[in-house]
Amino acid sequence: QEDGGRLIQKMFDRVSSVLAVKKAFSVEDLMRVIWPYSGPEHLRLMRGWGEDMHGAGSRWRVPTPQVLPEEELEALTAVFSFHDKDHSGTVTAEELIHAGLLDREAALRFIAEAEGVTDGQLDLHAFCELMCPTGYRAKEEATKATTKE
């Protein structure tokens, strides 16, 4: 524990010293904070790895999934409307769990990460994003999707 405390103090000192002198924080500065015992040769090596990954470009990026066909989106909207019994424009995660559409763990994980979820209430957009089939994204502007792989 004492070693951990010293390491944290050293990291804090490094960040403080860099920020006191510089107006900008570079990749090398970040590497020095994360790996406090790295020397110039290590920094060059790690910088090279970063450049290799950046140069590889699309090799590291998964292709963007297709947008869900309109008729499929309409079907999801109908399912949403069916479960929106009070016509409030939202459904609760509990309702979806009780209907058998989600298991509790998946629902809680989604609610913690999703936009369009307030107090456990999913709006139509969040519902469609959650229930969108694998390999598609609910709408063109969707930022999350799952791939078939």
Image (tube, grey):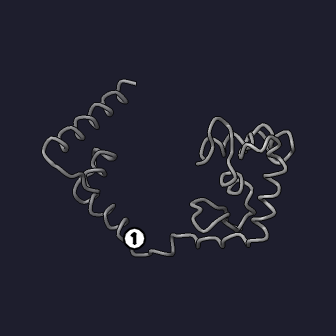
Residue placed under numbered mark 1 in the picture: 54
Q: Residue at x 74, y 56 (%)?
A: 131
**Label 1 element class:** helix
Q: Nearer the viewer, residue 54 or 10?
A: 54
* Residue 61 in view (yes/no): yes
Please state the horizontal and vertical placement of residue 23, each as a whole percent of the image: 17, 49
Residue in the image at 66% along x and 73% along y = 66
Residue 144 spot, x, y in % from top left: 60, 59
Relative to 24, say whether 14 is above or below. above
Furthest-right residue in view?
Answer: 99
Left or right, 79 with reference to 35:
right
Residue at the location (66% across, 55% down)?
A: 125
Tally of numbered discs: 1
Residue 36: x, y in percent?
28, 44
Where 119 falls versus 70 (above or below)?
above
Left or right placement of residue 67 versus residue 9 in this view: right
Residue type (three-letter) at the residue carrying disc 1: His
Q: Residue 16, position in %: x, y?
A: 21, 37
> Which quadrant holds residue 143?
bottom right
State left or right for residue 109 relative to residue 28. right
Residue farthest along the front direction in this orientation: 87
Which part of the image, by quadrant, shows the N terminus?
top left
Residue 9, by quadrant, is top left
Q: Is residue 98 left or right of residue 20?
A: right
Name the residue at the top extreme: 2
Q: Quadrant of the C terminus?
A: bottom right
